[in-house]
Image (cartoon, helix red, strand yellow):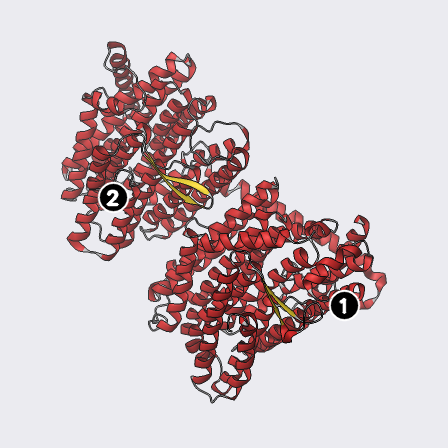
């Protein structure tokens, strides 16, 4: 019974839980309820992934309406993998949320905060699981609207402006996506992804379809913060509450990358894409993103903003993987989606712990804290090594595949850019390490205590995962390869 | 007790963990026992031809591959680690103790690595662990020098990784065997090895960072990094002609810098480049005799250079600086250190019956056998120079010369023990070289003590000693002064940044020009555009909705345009 409805439950449980949380009394109860919901989701996501790892595909007809008329949830290794990232990060971020939210969000708003969090989770899971492009747009709006609300709850008043900016830009992106979907619908009369992949090839010569594709690629490109459409991201991540920075940085852009993969390879196809400038655009913008965002990151004075720019650079790597379009390149993109969620999650958690103790995320304020908060510093250090791509960490695995993919295509420039990006990462992570460990703390201040255990445990969970997935690549690379086969094997 | 395919770095890494959680005498015991037990294990249980493979990422990694070459370096690094650890026993600094164990382990990992990826992993680990031995000095200077050191080392690692990736792409093989200078991968890897080996113009990290390390850290540093690079060259590029010339330059140019340098530990750093030059020459010649000479010289160099660094470390530990101009007359209070330092100096100068002689003469003989007469003369000049700057200058200015009036104490017992062991090894290998020769990887019949060799070397030494005495008496010898000597790092510090600034300025200028052109061009569009000049659409500006909308329009427009053209 549960297994049959697994995919629906993953979306329905957080959706139904959201209004319930809104009615709960203030205090720890909303948190506890959200926590249990997210853990249930994680369990279901693991179950679902386990069902599809061998390449099987689950098709679920919503309300018993057969596709292409009804909405279909279609689960294969690709979206089960992304759903696991989303549910997993939510499950790890929530234990961290308790203390962090208590400090950053006014008490009367906490039920609403957790409601918005659950809606955001619903939206992100819905995007990954649905097999219907319009339904995808709806879930994209659910996740976006709730994340605007979440970002606006940041402690500084600038969070409001940041959220407002994100709202405008995100809406433009979503509108572009909707325009594209509308054009496709006008041409084919279908919204189901599998149905579209059968019907679209007949219309590939039409200019309308090319225009639709252009709108979709640019619109989704904005949502995934592809350079130079990334400008909403630094402010949003900088001023959001700490736990939201953790959650969004680890999941939101990854889900958008997934949408891009789905649109490019499943709805349209690899061969159609080759007739459009998509590959070249991704190559140029990916390279530009890695270089420019890395340089911007080096010059930031705010740790969260530094990490945000680093995220833009990392998205550049994923875009490069799509640009190669080869099995190796897509594997690199998928693996990096997973690994980047781990490392950025851990890094934002470490910065969040510093913010929890200091109330500021300015790098200058961190001077000498490494000795007073050794566990937080060590977590930041190891996650930073992973971001750089030092062997033995998860980051190395994804860089490795990406460079191999670049060399396979004899694309020397991309290979050099990827390695140069690592060098930039050394420099900007060094800024944090230098402030935390090598500068001496101002004498007058009272000693700062280590972060509380409820912040440290989730942080270290992600740090250990960074190390574990640097050695055991069975889960990440194995599933990514299955997923890539599915993406590339669909009707051409 | 252990399986013979246990990679030798593992005991050191485990010990590093134990060091982290223990303290006091227990920590000391663990640190001393690790190289002893590990070395005995390597000596008795591990024979050539053992490999251990490990599958990862669809590739077969080989963290353990033993043959006569890697085993020789394995023994050497265990000896070096033991000496340095004993020398550092009085240090109460967890960072240094852990870093030094990891560093020694990484060096062992690198020489037993059977594939390029494993090599790369340990190559980077060498850099990351060793830099803490520099930072542990905890001075502003050491911090900056350490960071520069790290940049060089990480660049070397990046080049190695890039080379390895190209190699895989082209040949499908990861094996770390003969590489040679064919193609891009060969050159990339060659350059990576070259940086770690301190090739001319890539050598600044060494002379910059080693003198800034802690007294004990420098002993560790002198033993491992460059020798791993020599090992890697000997395996990957034996017989590569260009190495002969590079090596010769390396032997000669540091002499000039070393003679005028005041900081005696920096003199030793220059002297290290000079000694590595002999090894690089040997690798470049590539005959069995030359290669044996190169690795044997690496073996001896670790011990006598270690001894000299230990002696200077002891001085630094007791006096607080190692400037030739501030020292002098220390033999009165540190007689044992002075004696041991002289043994090291004699070895590095290649006095017959000291260890430097038995290995350096192999390289020299191979050089003349291959008909490189001019280069042989250059090496001869370099040998004389070594005697000057390392053999005479170090002990003379530190322990004798004018009495500086410093009255201090003899070095601590553990330092004396470590130095005595090293000195004993220098004399033992120098007088009984057959034991070292038996370990050498290639089969060669060679005996250094024939009349020609001994006489040539003695003449060389006595005449250069004469030159030193004469120059000193005449007051012509460069005096020991507090000064900063410019080396090739000047290129990195002045012209390169200047060029970067120039490029940046011209780019900005060009940008401004373009900006003004576009502005004048847009003037006719009316005042509305004037109020929002294009420069406002900067990608890093904080409140950028306008910029974003502009960009999305630009990208969509460009995309559609190209798409239409492609259709």
Mark 2 chain: B
**For the residue labelled by badge 1, is the local secondary structure a helix, a strand or a loop?**
helix
Q: Is residue B120 above or below residue A485?
A: above
**Residue B471 shows up from this direction:** yes
Is disc 1 surrounded by few (<14), some (14 to 19) or many (20+) residues within 10 Å?
some
User: What is the x, y in percent for residue B507?
Assistant: 66, 49
Question: Would residue A23 be found to the left or right of residue B137 on screen?
Answer: right
Nearer to us in this view, A132 or B131: A132
2 and 1 marks on the same chain: no
User: What is the x, y in percent for residue B372?
Assistant: 42, 14
Is disc 2 surrounded by few (<14), some (14 to 19) or many (20+) residues within 10 Å?
some
Question: Would residue A293 be found to the left or right of residue B481 on screen?
Answer: right
User: What is the x, y in percent for residue B132?
Assistant: 34, 49
Taking the spot 34% from the left edge, 43% from the top edge, the residue there is B106
Q: How many marks?
A: 2
User: What is the x, y in percent for residue B436?
Assistant: 24, 24
Which residue is the site of mark 1? A182
**For the residue labelled by badge 2, is the local secondary structure a helix, a strand or a loop?**
helix
Mark 1 chain: A
Q: On the image, which quarter does residue A103 sit in?
A: bottom left
Nearer to us in this view, A383 or B3: B3
Real-space Cα separation, disc 2 to disc 1, in angstroms: 77 Å
Which residue is the site of mark 2? B316
Nearer to us in this view, B166 or B459: B166
Q: Is residue A138 above or below residue B394?
A: below
Nearer to us in this view, B406 or A81: A81
């Amino acid at each position: 019974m549960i297994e049959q409805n697994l995919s629906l439950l993953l979306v329905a449980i957080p959706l139904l839980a959201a209004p319930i949380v809104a009615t709960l009394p203030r205090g720890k109860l909303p948190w506890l309820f959200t926590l249990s919901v997210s853990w249930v989701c994680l369990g279901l996501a693991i179950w679902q992934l386990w069902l599809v790892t061998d390449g099987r595909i689950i098709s679920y007809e919503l309300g018993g309406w057969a596709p292409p008329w009804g909405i279909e949830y279609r689960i294969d290794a690709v979206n089960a993998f992304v759903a696991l990232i989303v549910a997993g990060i939510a499950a790890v971020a929530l234990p961290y949320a308790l203390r962090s939210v208590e400090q950053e969000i006014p008490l009367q708003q906490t039920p609403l905060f957790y409601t918005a969090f659950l809606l955001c989770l619903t939206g992100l899971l819905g995007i990954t699981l649905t097999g219907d492009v319009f339904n995808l747009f709806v879930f994209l709006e659910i996740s976006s609207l709730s994340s605007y609300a979440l970002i606006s709850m940041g402690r500084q008043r600038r969070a409001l402006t940041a959220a407002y900016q994100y709202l405008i830009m995100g809406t433009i992106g979503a509108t572009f996506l909707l325009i594209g979907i509308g054009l496709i619908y006008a041409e084919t009369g279908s919204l189901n992804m599998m149905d579209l992949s059968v019907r679209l090839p007949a219309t590939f010569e039409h200019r309308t379809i090319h225009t639709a594709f252009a709108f979709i690629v640019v619109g989704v490109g904005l949502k995934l913060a592809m350079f130079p459409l990334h400008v909403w991201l630094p402010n949003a991540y900088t001023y959001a509450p700490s736990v939201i920075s953790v959650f969004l940085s680890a999941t939101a852009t990854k889900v958008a990358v997934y949408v891009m993969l789905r649109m490019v390879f499943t709805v349209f196809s690899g061969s159609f894409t080759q007739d459009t400038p998509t590959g070249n655009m991704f190559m140029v913008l990916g390279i530009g993103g890695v270089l420019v965002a890395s340089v911007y990151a080096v010059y930031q004075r705010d740790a969260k903003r530094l990490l945000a720019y680093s995220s833009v650079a990392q998205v550049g790597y994923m875009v490069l993987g799509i640009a190669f379009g080869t099995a190796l390149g897509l594997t690199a993109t998928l693996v990096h989606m997973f690994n980047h969620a781990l490392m950025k999650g851990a890094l934002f958690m470490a910065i969040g712990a510093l913010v929890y103790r200091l109330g500021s995320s300015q790098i200058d304020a961190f001077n000498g804290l490494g000795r007073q908060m050794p566990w937080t510093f060590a977590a930041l250090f190891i996650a930073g090594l992973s971001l750089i791509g030092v062997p033995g960490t998860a980051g190395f695995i994804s860089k490795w595949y990406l460079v191999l993919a670049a060399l396979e295509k004899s694309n020397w420039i991309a290979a050099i850019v990827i390695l140069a990006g690592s060098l930039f990462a050394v420099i900007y992570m060094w800024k944090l390490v230098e402030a935390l460990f090598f500068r001496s703390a101002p004498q007058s201040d009272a000693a700062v205590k280590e972060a509380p255990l409820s912040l440290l445990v989730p942080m270290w969970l992600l740090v250990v995962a960074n190390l574990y997935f640097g050695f055991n690549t069975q889960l990440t690379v194995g599933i990514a390869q299955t997923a890539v086969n599915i993406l590339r094997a669909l009707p051409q | 007790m252990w399986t013979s395919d246990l990679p030798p770095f593992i005991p050191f890494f485990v010990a590093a963990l134990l060091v982290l959680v223990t303290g006091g005498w227990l920590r000391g015991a663990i640190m001393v026992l690790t190289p002893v037990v590990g070395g005995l294990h390597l000596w008795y249980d591990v024979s050539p031809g053992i490999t251990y493979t490990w599958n990862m990422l669809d590739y077969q990694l080989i963290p353990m591959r033993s043959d006569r070459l890697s085993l020789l370096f394995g023994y050497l690094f265990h000896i070096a680690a033991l000496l340095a650890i004993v020398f550092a026993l009085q240090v109460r600094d967890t960072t240094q103790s852990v870093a030094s164990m990891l560093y020694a382990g990484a060096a062992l990992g690198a020489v037993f690595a059977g594939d390029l990826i494993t090599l790369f992993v340990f190559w980077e680990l060498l850099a990351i662990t060793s830099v803490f031995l520099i930072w542990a000095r905890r001075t502003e200077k050491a911090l900056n020098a350490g960071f520069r050191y790290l940049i060089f080392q990480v660049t070397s690692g990046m080049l190695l990784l890039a080379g390895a990736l190209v190699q895989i792409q082209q040949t499908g093989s990861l094996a770390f065997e003969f590489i040679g200078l064919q193609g891009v991968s060969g050159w990339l890897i060659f350059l990576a090895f070259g940086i770690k080996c301190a090739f001319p113009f890539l050598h600044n990290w060494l002379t910059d960072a080693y003198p800034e390390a802690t007294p004990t850290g420098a002993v560790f540093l002198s033993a491992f990094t460059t020798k791993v690079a020599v090992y890697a060259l000997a395996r990957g590029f034996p017989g590569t002609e260009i190495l002969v010339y590079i090596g010769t330059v390396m032997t000669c140019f540091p002499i000039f810098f070393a003679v005028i340098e005041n900081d005696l530990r920096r003199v030793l750093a220059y002297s290290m480049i000079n000694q590595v030059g002999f090894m690089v020459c040997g690798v470049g010649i590539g005959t069995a005799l030359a290669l044996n000479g190169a690795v044997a010289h690496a073996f001896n160099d670790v011990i006598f250079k270690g001894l000299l660094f230990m002696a200077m470390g002891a001085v630094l530990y007791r006096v607080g600086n190692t400037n030739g101009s501030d020292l002098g007359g220390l033999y009165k209070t540190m007689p044992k250190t002075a004696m041991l330092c002289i043994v090291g100096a004699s070895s590095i100068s290649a006095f017959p019956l000291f260890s430097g002689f038995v290995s350096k003469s192999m390289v020299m003989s191979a050089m003349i056998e291959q008909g490189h007469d001019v280069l042989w003369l250059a090496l001869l000049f370099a040998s004389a120079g070594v005697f000057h700057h390392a053999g005479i200058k170090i002990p003379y200015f530190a322990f004798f010369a004018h009495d500086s009036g410093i009255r201090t104490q003899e070095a601590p017992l553990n330092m004396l023990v470590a130095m005595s062991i090293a000195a004993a090894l220098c004399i033992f290998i120098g007088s009984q070289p057959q034991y070292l020769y038996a370990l050498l990887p290639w089969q060669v019949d060679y005996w250094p003590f024939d009349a020609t060799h001994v006489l040539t070397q003695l003449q060389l030494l006595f005449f250069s000693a004469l030159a030193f005495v004469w120059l000193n008496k005449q007051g012509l010898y460069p005096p020991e002064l507090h000064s900063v000597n410019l080396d090739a790092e000047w290129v990195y510090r002045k012209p390169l940044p200047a060029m970067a600034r120039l490029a940046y300025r011209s780019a900005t200028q060009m940008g401004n020009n373009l900006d003004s052109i576009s502005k004048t061009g847009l003037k006719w569009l009316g005042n509305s555009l004037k109020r929002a000049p294009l420069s406002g659409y900067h990608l890093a500006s904080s409140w950028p909705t306008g910029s974003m909308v502009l960009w999305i329009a630009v990208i969509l427009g460009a995309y559609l345009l190209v798409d239409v053209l492609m259709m």
